[in-house]
Image (cartoon, rainbow, N blue to C red):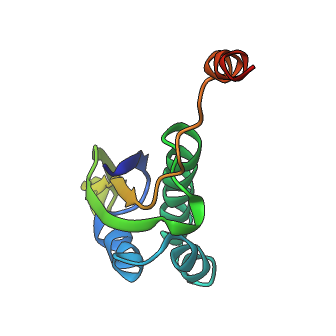
Amino acid sequence: MAVKAESKGVRLSPRKVAAVAALVRGRTVADALVILEHTPRRAALPVLKTIKSAQANASHNHGYKADTLVITEITVNHGARQKRYRPAAMGRALPYMKRSSHIRVLVDGEQRPAKKPAAAKAATKKEEK
């Protein structure tokens, strides 16, 4: 089972973010974090944050080992576009769009062994005595 994290409404064009996402596709999370920390692109920060969020979700909520996580899938899709106008010569207005992106990261790795609940541990200790 893969664990996902999503980042919606990143104020960058999907084309720019997808170029950065392609750098880390298929790598381990530790490698991806190092690569993104040294990538001099503005899109590296939102991708880095989304990968860290997926790592935290996997280790805290789903019981995966943080050092074994691998990015199985990373996709960048179009988000909402804001239509704006820029002043032009002779009193005209020219349209342009402020584009945004949605980033989706799936990670998978080795799960930690499930811990027994405290009540079950106490019951087994009583049975042993």
Quadrant for the C terminus in the image? top right
Q: Residue lying at the far right in this picture: please name it.
A: 129
Residue 30 falls in image quadrant: bottom right
Taking depth in this image into account, of 129 and 41 the one nearest to the observer is 129
Relative side of 19 to 124, left or right: left
User: In the depicted view, which residue is nearer to us: 62 or 79?
Assistant: 62
The answer to which quarter of the image holds residue 72 is bottom left
The residue located at (48%, 41%) in the rendering is: 62
Q: Position of residue 3 (x, y in %)?
A: 38, 48
Q: Quadrant of residue 17?
A: bottom left
Percent across and percent down for residue 67 are 58, 67
Q: Is residue 117 above or below residue 42?
A: above
Which residue is painted at 33% across and 51% down in the image?
2
Residue 93 sits above or below residue 39 on the image: above
Determine whether 31 is above or below 56 in the image: below
Q: Identify which residue, 115 or 54, lies in the foreground.
A: 115
Residue sitting at x 37%, y 72%:
21
Q: Residue 72 versus residue 85: which sits nearer the camera?
A: 72
View extreme (front): residue: 129
User: Residue 85 placed where, x, y %?
Assistant: 31, 50
Q: Say left or right for 63 vs 72.
A: right
Residue 73 screen position, x and y as percent: 29, 64
Q: How many marks?
A: 0
Q: Residue at x 40, y 82 (%)?
A: 23
